[in-house]
Amino acid sequence: MQQSFFTLFLARLLGGRWWRTFHMRAVLWVSLATAVVLLAGSALIVPVEEGAPGATITSFPRAIWWSVETATTVGYGDMYPVTGWGRVIAAVVMLAGITTFGMVTAAIATWFVGKAEQDAHEVGAAVRHYTREGEEAFHAEVRALHERFDRVEHLLEGSDGR
């Protein structure tokens, strides 16, 4: 049986090293929870708003659009809840959206900082390596000069005694 692209992509995505990091798993779970909140909010707001005077969220497709624009904090103003329970549902959808985008932003920032930190450690290791090589070369040169001076002193001592 041939696997779909989505299945292969998910297997590749979840099988990698980065998936094992806590923040990436947290982003996925928060995103999934947000999707559930958006769908639940859409399903719950339609019966709450449907019969209210001046209601604009009167069908499930309109409710999906409203929940997405609310979660993303776009809020065009074309649809909004007019009942108290509708506003409670809206607050939950807003908090879920804000949490999701905050977590995604934090995960991306953590990845960039982690990468920069890894690069800094690699540069530091290279600098330490070349510093050590330079010190060893310097010490070898100083030893060679001491040996030459010792030979010159020995020769001078031998010529003084004659």
Image (cartoon, rainbow, N blue to C red):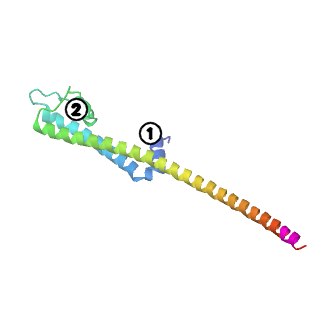
Residue type, mark 2 in image: Ala
Is residue 90 one of those drawn in magenta?
no
Please provide the residue range marked out in magenta: 155-160
**Chief SS of the magenta region:** helix
**125 on left or right of 72:** right
Q: Residue 42: in sight, yes or no?
A: yes
**Percent position (x, y) of residue 56?**
16, 27
**137 on left or right of 159:** left
Identify the residue at the far left of this view: 53
- Image: 3 above or below 145: above
**15 on left or right of 37:** right
Q: Residues within 10 Å of mark 1 (few under 14, many from 20)?
A: few
**115 on left or right of 55:** right
User: Which numbered disc covers residue 49?
Assistant: none
**Percent position (x, y) of residue 148?**
79, 63
Q: Secondary structure at mark 1?
A: helix
* Residue that label 2 marks: 63
Front residue of 104 and 115: 115
- Image: 100 above or below 73: below
Residue at x 28%, y 44% (from the top left corner): 99
Q: First in sequence: mark 2 or mark 1? A: 1
Front residue of 123 and 10: 123
